[in-house]
Amino acid sequence: MKKILAMALTVCMLLSMVSIAVAESTPAKTKLTLWTFISQHDKYYYSMADAWNADHPDQQIELECVTLGYDEMHNKMKVALQSGEGAPDICDVEVGQFPNILAYSDHLVELESYMGDYMSQLVKSRLDLYSKGGHLYGIPYHIGATVTFYNVAMLEAAGIDYKTIKTWDDWYNAGLKLKESNPNVYMGNVETSTQWQTALMITQQGSEFVDNSDEANPKPTINTPAMLKAIQTQQSWLKAGIAMVCPGGQVDTEEGKAWLATNVCASVTMPLWYMSRFTDEIGDACKGEYAISTCPVFEEGQSQSVGLGGTGTVVVKDNPNYDLAAQFDVYAKATKAAAEKIWSQLGFDPCNKEVWTDTAVTHDASNKFNQYFLTNAFDTLLSINEIKGVASTSISPTINTYLSTTLWNEVYVDMADPASALEEAQTAIEDELF
Amino acid sequence: MSTASVRLQNPSKKKRRALFLLFVGAAVLILGIAALLSLGGKGTKFDAAYDAHADTGAYIFGTLAEGQSYNALQSFWLLVARSRNVWMLGGLLLMALYVGLNPSLLYSQSIAPYVFVLPFVLTFLIFFLYPLISTTIMSFQSIKSDSSTWVGFKNYNDLFKNDTFYTAVTNSLRYTVITCALLIPFPLVFAYMLNAKSMKLSGVFKAILFIPVLSSVVVAGIVFRMMFSELDGALMNQVRELFGLSPIIWLKGEWTAMFAMVLLCCWRWTGMNILYYMAGIKSIPGELYEAADIDGANALQKFWKIGWPLLKPTTIYVLTISIYAGLSMFTESYMIFGNNSSPKNYGLTIVGYLYRYGFEKVDKFGFASAVGLVLLLGAMIINLLQLRITGVIGKRKGD
């Protein structure tokens, strides 16, 4: 009896295994998974997947987007690539984390063959950010050109015309004038958990955080005259009381956005993608208050903008459907249709510059970004003299971590002497790079 | 001994049949497991490469040179590795068949204890011993995505030279000392208060104090982050305002950041420790207090002469788990600061440091393994010292 029972159980088990194997028949649509760390991106990808399916009746895809937290997603992706298992087909990788992911470039699809003519149509400096050894591994959304958002009514109440602000000195003097007429508001903010403004200030002076002249062996360049000047400038704002250390460390945090929503800040210098934070998260509190303008410079002739932030979308080679995934990646990020949507839906300055001059798209009155701001983003973009790029190297994550956890807190919260803080930072970062 | 157990414990009369099935089964199972381990977690990719007739040796033996081919043994091993599931399942089935043929085994009293401890032994081997050994090996290697090279003591050298490591150690130790210093006396006092006959509504207070234990540290961490936010309207800044103090940036000060983490820990664990102490207090025989009353002892004397010594086992237990929890703290800091990097590393703990190198940086797995081992050794030394001082281990003779 027992033997019969045992045999019956064994047969049951085997049968169930067979049925599982049979159930895994191929679906009509190819399933692609995508990881991202920003919820707006996932809506964008779903809309692009619908467009792809309409255009490609015999290559239908079923896209599944998974939105994870910033650290969680990048760490999971690194572990997945390292172990060779569990990576999605497509993944959004933030530019600051890109060098970490590029360490596993063997597992990523080289996208240049899929890009075709788009290689020359997209802004080269942005493609370079996501390239290694002459191969492209990620497709960008945007340039991320820094601009300055001015609160026009607040400035006008103090008798300031934002259009006359050309240099950081003008900006400083405007701040003093503003403070005089209304001591409760600030001209701007100083960041302690990131370095958008500082990156702009040092690139304007022709410097960077990294000396990337020897690509195989990048070196940190923190203790530079350009950095010193950038820090001294921002310290002077704090001393004069025309700026405050941004709540949350920078304006792209919950606290930072809550602070902006109280309408006490006359200007914000951020990459253009910050528009979507205004419309989607800060909301009506600042609607119709801000105009978009070029950033101040130290001296006339310096570049008014630098491309900051960004996301490169990579395709994982280990997965069976990588060919289709790569085609979809190009379709969703590099085409003109994609560029139009990147602007109209996400409020980014697309890398495909064809769109920039297409006024039907850029000046569309029904566009929520055009309705929110007093000036048109593309008018400003086209008026910028030069948009510089910054290098992103294998040592950049280490540098960024040190700056955003330690250096800025020392010089802006503790108001330490910038020269000695910089010297200390340079040694500390060199020590970290073992 | 009852007659039933005599009957059951009498296998010698009945000869076991087909013993070879057990040995063959075990051998096949071990072969399958060895094949699985030799793949080092890259099973899916190996299978795909094997089925595609690609170079599969890279996963086990190293890549082939041009014109070279595998010897018979290597080819056999690759075959076993591909069909590892069949081997493991087959081994189990053969062993099950052996048991099926000798049903008396199911009632054997000499085998039963081993069957009962098997789950623990297996968990220990798979989830503790195996990781510990492979961590030790990895701590002497430099681990890249597709290769591992031996580097000797380089990881340890780098570790002891790194200033941030000492910051992490200081933070962890500081946190451990403070939480231990708070989480023993206060729960003890609360437990006495809740146990007192004159205490009204003690059930309600017990429930209120215990609820935080049930909350998720992630949720609690987010709530604490908002409480300690630097905005003027944040709860802790409002509290300061009540006392006429100006708002401060809590999470950017060395001690205020530590205060936030310690407060979260105390809020969550006070209730648990109260429970331990209440159980300890309940187990003290009432006669002792009665005798003390007759001798005219006052409340304080009763506590020092009866309560405190008899609660020593509870205190040692609470201290041991608090030391362990303090040294391994990570989630609290991660949630309060929103990520693993805090201003000037005020919130960086040893585990946070390990996480930074193991998962946030690239190709530093070997280094992170060294951090893990140093943490393990440190925690072990501190706890052994503590247990030795409190007399749990060693100096039995003097008792």
Image (cartoon, coloured by chain):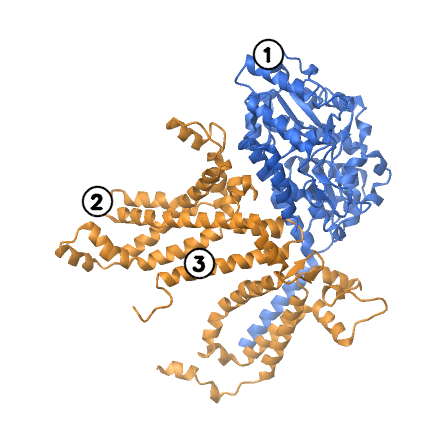
Secondary structure found at label 3:
helix
Q: Position of residue B363 (x, y in %)?
A: 67, 53
Q: Quadrant of residue A214?
A: top right
Distance of mark 1 from mark 3, alpha carbons?
63 Å
In the rendered structure, the colour chosen for chain B is orange
- What amino acid type is highlighted by mark number 3? Ile
In the rendered structure, the colour chosen for chain A is blue
- What amino acid type is highlighted by mark number 2? Ser
The residue pinned by badge 1 equals A158
Secondary structure found at label 1:
loop
Q: Residues within 10 Å of mark 2 (few under 14, many from 20)?
A: few
At a point 64% along the width and 65% down the height, the residue shown is A15
At a point 75% along the width and 34% down the height, the residue shown is A389
Which callout, 2 or 3, points to the residue nearer the camera? 3
Distance of mark 2 from mark 3, alpha carbons?
40 Å
Compared to residue A222, the image places residue B93 above or below, namely: below
Circle 1 chain? A
Q: Position of residue A190 (x, y in %)?
A: 59, 28
The residue pinned by badge 2 equals B198
Which callout, 2 or 1, points to the residue nearer the camera? 1
Q: Position of residue B293 (x, y in %)?
A: 15, 55
At a point 47% along the width and 77% down the height, the residue shown is B111
Residue B34 vs residue B95, the one in the foreground:
B34
Q: Quadrant of residue A49?
A: top right
The residue pinned by badge 3 equals B382
Residue B397 appears in the figure: yes
